[in-house]
Amino acid sequence: MAYDFSKLKASIKETEEWLLRELSGVRTGRATPTLLDGVKPEAYGTRTPLRELASVSVEDARTLRIVPWDMSILKTIEKGITEADLGVGVAIDDQGLRVSFPSLTSERRTQLSKLAGDKTEQAKVTLRSHRTDALKALETAEKAGGIGEDEVKRLKNEIQKLIDIGNDSLIKVLERKEEEIAQ
């Protein structure tokens, strides 16, 4: 009986994607539209995600341009960004809004690196959990008599190789993020 690694591989991929999503929200010295994903201004009687109210684009390394679909809610969007307390400067001009991101201090860079490291550690813990689940499934199959002892050893090594590859991938994601933070 061949062991199916597809579930484990999918779990490893999901964990890496989760880490990428989490780290995309960690502000670096560069302005990216994802930094405003958490902004939900009070518009039309309800809190609405900014991306549903306006287009957000990168103007330069430290500035985002926000062009509302409806210019009458310009002040509402400005208020929403200010209330989000992102530590950014917001200015209204004739085309919409400009959001300026200040340079990061060395203290803030250290905090962000620690946060990125913590998120990566969470992802590694998740990978270890996936490994445990896969090993338990393997044990169950062995007890049921579907897999021999030599095959179990080989499959355990294969599971560990997949987890090691996943961990290496998480570390690379962290290193890229730390590079961004350092710039």
Image (tube, rainbow, N blue to C red):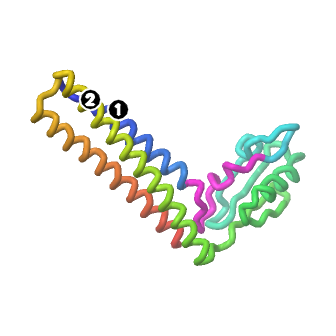
Question: Residue visible at 30% across and 47% down?
Answer: 163
Dots 2 and 1: beta carbons under 8 Å?
Answer: yes
14 and 54: which is toward the camera: 14
Disc 1 marks which residue? 7
156 and 174: which is toward the camera: 156
Q: Given the image, on which type of amino acid does mark 1 rest?
A: Lys
Question: Residue visible at 25% across and 46% down?
Answer: 160
113 and 126: which is toward the camera: 126
Q: Given the image, on which type of amino acid does mark 2 rest?
A: Asp
Q: What secondary structure is marked by label 1? A: helix
Question: Residue visible at 65% across and 67% down?
Answer: 62
Q: Residue 118: x percent and y percent?
A: 50, 59
Q: Which residues, given as a range, are shown in magenta?
A: 24-40
Q: Residue furthest left?
A: 150
Q: Residue 96: x percent and y percent?
A: 81, 55
Question: Residue visible at 33% across and 40% down?
Answer: 132
Residue 114 — which label? none
Give the vertical position of 122 relative to 2 (above or below).
Answer: below
Q: Residues within 10 Å of mark 2 (few under 14, many from 20)?
A: few
Residue 4 — which label? 2
The answer to whether residue 130 is left or right of residue 3 is right
Q: Quadrant of the N terminus?
A: top left
Give the vertical position of 165 relative to 142 (above or below).
Answer: below
Q: What secondary structure is marked by label 2? A: loop
Residue 11 lies within the magenta run: no
Q: Residue 39: x percent and y percent?
A: 73, 50
Main secondary structure found in the magenta portion: loop
